[in-house]
Amino acid sequence: MAVLVTGGAGYIGSAFVEQLLAAGEETVVLDDLSRGHRAAVHPKAALYEGRTGDRALVARIAREHPLDACVHFAAFAYVGESVTEPARYFDNNFTQAQVLFESLVAAGVKRVVFSSTCATYGVPAEVPIPESHPQWPINPYGWSKLFVERLLECFDRAYGLRFVALRYFNAAGATTRCGEAHAPETHLIPLVLAAAARRRSSVRVFGQDYDTPDGTAVRDYIHVEDLGEAHILALAHLRRGGESHFLNLGNGTGYSVLEVIAAARRVTGLDVPYEKGPRREGDPPRLVGDATKARVVLGWTPKRPSLEAIVRSAWEWMQSHPDGYGAGE
Ligand SMILES: NC(=O)c1ccc[n+]([C@@H]2O[C@H](COP(=O)([O-])OP(=O)(O)OC[C@H]3O[C@@H](n4cnc5c(N)ncnc54)[C@H](O)[C@@H]3O)[C@@H](O)[C@H]2O)c1
């Protein structure tokens, strides 16, 4: 059988494709390269360039490969952009996903692993956040993902589409081949490392007066390979006939911005210049996930939980890919 990976030219998708191929799976990537990189796609994966909402293309892929499941990473993922361009986010993240799932069901493919996010919770009332926590996003990005979660439930009931929706906390780190090269980059670890390497003058720390031990915001960083392993386990769960689930993926440990900067200094041996900025609107003080359910349902255990190991893998990737994936797509 073959697995369709949408967004397989992006950061998390490209790393996952590597793991899927290593597991011996026939792997088909669907990506419009709007935010990803052709060079990130493993040469052993079949690449179809196009949008997830292209019914004819998805039908063609299903005719050309024996698909039995889809891992749906493709989406736009900038919170700020979603606030200024909500229509684009609802179209790309929700409407395109709806058409994709319809096309899959029409082709008889009824197993989906979906990239959801801790942004569906909004401002947490309790930390670590369990899956049962109320979901009330504070930006269109979070809503677009939450709508897909509800859509999947409806498709499960009506069409028998079984899914595992994985709510990631902060994906971080790299494999030897695949790393983070977003443009613009908004994620803390690549920004901190770019400051260490003097590719940017400094990194800005938003908020110094949160109710956290050092006053800076605390986040749960999860290695991209640990994320990928959870997707492999989710596919196995669905292939065993397992029921649909919503599962958090995080380490359950939070690190502050200053702790990330300190880890980057230790790993690189370089100074990390930073400047203090005001809090950003809508940034909760602490976002840490309770991933007990993923451990129980999938048997998943993060194997690379140390912040230093995560930062080191990102630094090594940056050293071996000084221009990211190059100037092209
Ligand atoms: N990076 C994180 O920390 C994080 C956290 C929570 C959730 N997520 C989710 O994980 C997924 C992957 O994130 P990422 O950081 O790898 O993002 P990314 O931008 O690096 O990758 C997304 C990929 O999807 C492609 N794409 C976007 N819309 C498409 C469409 N309509 N049709 C075809 N291809 C399309 C882009 O070209 C890109 O290659 C996203 O759904 C994101 O919302 C990421």
Image (cartoon, rainbow, N blue to C red):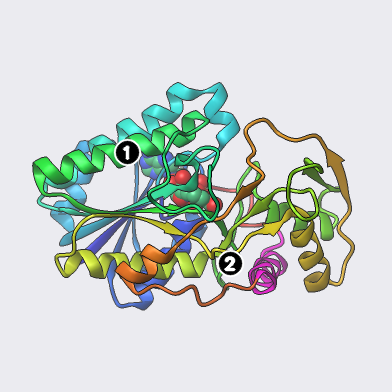
Q: Nearer the viewer, residue 86 or 243?
A: 243
- Residue 258's place in the image compared with 32, above or below, is below
Tag 1 residue:
148
Q: Residue at x 47, y 24 (%)?
A: 86
Residue 98, position as x, y percentages in the image? 25, 36
Tag 2 residue:
174
Q: Badge 2, how many Cα within 10 Å: few under 14, some, many 20+?
A: many
Residue 36: tell me if it is visible: no
| SS at badge 2 | loop
Q: Badge 1, how many Cα within 10 Å: few under 14, some, many 20+?
A: many
Q: Is residue 193 left or right of residue 304?
A: right
Residue 178: tell me if it is visible: yes
Q: Nearer the viewer, residue 234 or 208?
A: 208
Q: Is residue 297 left or right of residue 169?
A: left
Residue 258, position as x, y percentages in the image? 79, 56
Q: Earlier in the sequence, mark 1 or mark 2?
A: 1
Residue 269, position as x, y percentages in the image? 86, 72
- Residue 167's place in the image compared with 321, above or below, is above
Q: Residue at x 82, y 72 (%)?
A: 266
Residue span colored magenta: 307-322
Q: Nearer the viewer, residue 84 or 136?
A: 136
Task: Examine the residues drawn in magenta and state their main secondary structure.
Answer: helix
Q: Residue at x 49, y 52 (%)?
A: 129
